[in-house]
């Protein structure tokens, strides 16, 4: 199987100016390496919708990233705009990914219902919004990790059947 090229985008006003250490971004990169994914690009930027949109478009369209995972900006705070930015630039939503993460998270905390992250496709790139905390990012990514290689394969035009006999 082809190596999956990933981009990890951390959304944090404090992190973007060095006032907070990004712990979820490196964790996501490490976890995705377990499925043969290779980090092509990672960045920390502030919670600004236009900047998030521009970065996602650039990575999907110009950097040929297969999978972009964002971390942060998915809650209900006034500055949390990652889902809005993602929704503006995707062509197809893949709600099952985000639904699976929320369902599993609800087993651990009722605050999971406050997560507004979405998942979708732009061109041949899958984009997934994860929460920003280390614990929530880990728990959410663990849920979807087994399906990501197949999702990227199908998005890139793979023709093998999903099920096996």
Image (spheres, grey):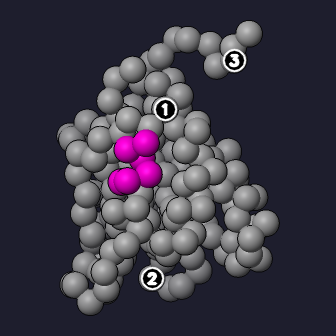
- In the drawing, what numbered circle is on residue 149? 1
Residues in magenta, as a range: 29-34
The 10 Å Cα crowd at callout 2, few under 14, some 14 to 19, many 20 or more, is some
The reply to whether callout 2 and callout 3 are in contact (CB within 8 Å) is: no
Which SS class for mark 2? Answer: loop
Residue at 55%, 44% in the rendered image: 145
* Mark-to-mark CA distance, 2 and 3: 41 Å
Which residue is nearer to you in this view: 126 or 48?
A: 126
Answer with mark 3 or mark 1, whichever residue precedes in sequence: 1
Residue at 23%, 51% in the rendered image: 41
Answer with mark 2 or mark 1, whichever residue precedes in sequence: 2
What residue occupies the far bottom of the structure in this picture? 19
Which SS class for mark 1? Answer: helix
Residue at 77%, 77% in the rendered image: 110
Q: Is residue 154 magenta?
A: no
Does residue 61 sit above or below 1 in this rendering?
below
Q: What is the chief secondary structure element of the magenta stretch?
A: helix
Choose top left, top right, bottom left or bottom right for residue 123: top left
Residue at 46%, 25% in the rendered image: 153
Residue 44, percent from left and from top: 27, 69
- In the drawing, what numbered circle is on residue 79? 2
Does residue 17 sit above or below 31 in this rendering?
below
Q: Nearer the viewer, mark 2 or mark 1?
A: 1
The residue that mark 3 highlights is: 163
Residue 32, percent from left and from top: 42, 47
Confirm whether residue 81 shows in the render.
Answer: no
Of the 4 image quadrants, the one containing the C terminus is top right
* Mark-to-mark CA distance, 3 and 1: 14 Å
């Amino acid at each position: 199987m082809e190596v999956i090229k990933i981009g990890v985008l951390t959304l944090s006003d404090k992190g973007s100016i060095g006032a907070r250490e990004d712990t979820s971004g490196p964790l996501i990169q490490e976890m995705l390496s377990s499925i043969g994914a290779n980090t092509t690009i990672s960045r920390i930027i502030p919670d600004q919708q236009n900047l998030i949109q521009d970065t996602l478009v650039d990575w999907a369209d110009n950097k040929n990233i297969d999978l972009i995972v964002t971390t942060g900006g998915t809650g209900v705070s006034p500055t949390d705009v990652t889902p809005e930015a993602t929704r503006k630039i995707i062509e197809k939503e893949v709600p099952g990914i985000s639904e699976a993460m929320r369902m599993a998270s609800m087993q651990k905390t009722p605050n999971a219902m406050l997560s507004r992250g979405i998942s979708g496709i732009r061109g041949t790139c899958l984009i997934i919004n994860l929460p920003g905390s280390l614990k929530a990012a880990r728990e959410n990514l663990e849920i979807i990790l087994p399906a990501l290689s197949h999702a990227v394969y199908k998005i890139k035009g793979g023709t093998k059947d999903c099920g096996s006999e």
